[in-house]
Image: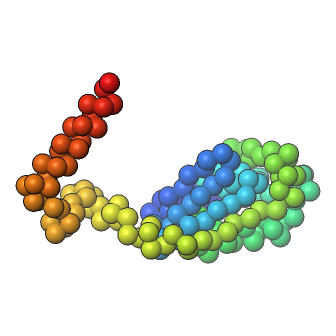
Amino acid sequence: MTSFRLNENKMFADVTDGIAIIINSETGIYYGMNAFGTQVYENLANGVSAENILEKIKSFGADEANFKAFIDAMKEKEILLPAQDSGAEAELSEEIAKEDKYELILKEYNDAQELLLADPIHEVKEDEGWSPEKSSLNEDKEDVARREAKMSAAENSSLE
């Protein structure tokens, strides 16, 4: 049986309101899926075998070629890696599949690539954590006092 898991070394994934967004932390490219694709992705990422999922979506009337292309695209983009079969049964909604016309869609976006790669989270070192360059820290005493006063004022106004 063919099973997968999220490539957590490169990818960060979140599912909100039934839609998956997966960010490649090395390239800054992110991927979005439709609701049916998200359901299939979640089952795959949780170790449900591709064969089990395929059997279920074929019972809905979904296309096997689209399913295989969807998995191939996620493997090619290194979103999914081979994994141990969890033995779990596929949990899919035929209603959602029907709403998405039984299509599994994975779209690639690079419009936020520079922003995602500039994020300081990429500078985190496992043993040290994040430490910005000294030049990025403004140590001017007047500026520090101004920032502290602003923070204090904000704290006081939130307590009122």
Residue under the point 30% across and 31% down:
157
Q: Would you say 149 lies left or right of 43 here?
A: left
Residue farthest along the top direction in this orientation: 160
Residue 67 in percent (x, y) is at 78, 65
Which colour scheme appears in the figure? rainbow
Residue 26 in percent (x, y) is at 44, 71
**Residue 125 vs residue 99, the one in the foreground:** 99
Q: Would you say 32 lies left or right of 37 here?
A: left
Residue under the point 75% across and 71% down:
69
**Residue 138 vs residue 90, the one in the foreground:** 138
Q: Can the viewer see residue 81?
A: no
Residue under the point 81% across and 48% down:
96
Q: Would you say 138 lies left or right of 69 here?
A: left
The quarter of the picture where residue 123 lies is bottom left
Q: How many marks?
A: 0
Q: Can the viewer see residue 38?
A: yes
The quarter of the picture where residue 1 lies is bottom right
In the image, residue 49 above or below residue 89? below
Residue 129 in percent (x, y) is at 25, 56
For the C terminus, the quadrant is top left
In the image, residue 88 above or below residue 83? above
Residue 82 in percent (x, y) is at 58, 63
Residue farthest along the left direction in this orientation: 141
Residue under the point 49% across and 72% down:
113
